[in-house]
Amino acid sequence: MATDLHIVRERARRALERGRVRHAALAVGLLLPALALVVVVAPRAGWAAAWSAGAALVAFVALWRGQAWARGVLPGFVCALLPLASAHAAARIGHLCTGDGCVSLCAPLCTTGGVLAGLALARWMRRQPSAWSAYAVSAALVVAVGATGCTCLGLGGVLGVLGGVLFGGVALALGRSARPVREN
């Protein structure tokens, strides 16, 4: 009898796990066309493909894991549009990106996009019960997707986005510590 119950529980656990993997794969599959578009318009397609694959992997693991991790996927992709759009806007303004020449416009815009994304994430996560898990997933997605636009700067653009997102993490920490603790 105990063995039958164990077998039923194990089958149920496996079915639940298959369902979670299927859900995560479907959701990431819906994101793949957007990530492919990002790769097509990126200044360096190889780097953009690597960062987009990293974003897809982070999203898959977070959605498969569920709970607070999964709550970070949507804000991460939405807020990633800020550094991505700012970097692409800089590339389309008409300046020439050659070596040090790109730093004058692209670097500040990548960093500004990262700061705005980090602040938007901090505001979004402010009321989440497990804000740090969701923020970590969101921040990873912002850096991965935002970095695809900032690859014209190489590592400097990625560090600009990362620094901006970390600034948002500090804002989240300060915002959460400034709130009074409610006692029930």
Image: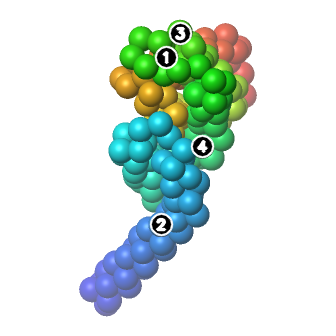
Q: Which kind of residue does numbered mark 3 sit on?
A: Ser
Secondary element under disc 3, as helix, strand or loop, is: helix
Q: Which residue is mark 3?
A: 104
x and y percentages locating residue 100 in the rendered image: 42, 11
Amino acid type indicated by mark 4: Phe
CA distance for labels 4 and 1: 26 Å
Q: Position of residue 52 (x, y in %)?
A: 44, 47
How crowded is the residue under tag 4: few (<14 C-alpha within 10 Å), some, or many (20+)?
A: many
- Residue that appears at 43% across and 30% down: 151
- The residue type indicated by label 1 comes to Cys
**In contact (CB < 8 Å): disc 4 and disc 2:** no
- Name the mark on residue 25: 2
Give the residue at mark 1. Answer: 102
Residue marked by disc 4: 77
Q: Which numbered disc, 3 or 2, marks the residue that appears first in the sequence?
A: 2
- Tell me the quadrant of the picture where the C terminus can be found: top right
Specify which label sits upstream in the sequence, 1 or 2.
2
The alpha-carbon separation of the residues under discs 3 and 2 comes to 40 Å
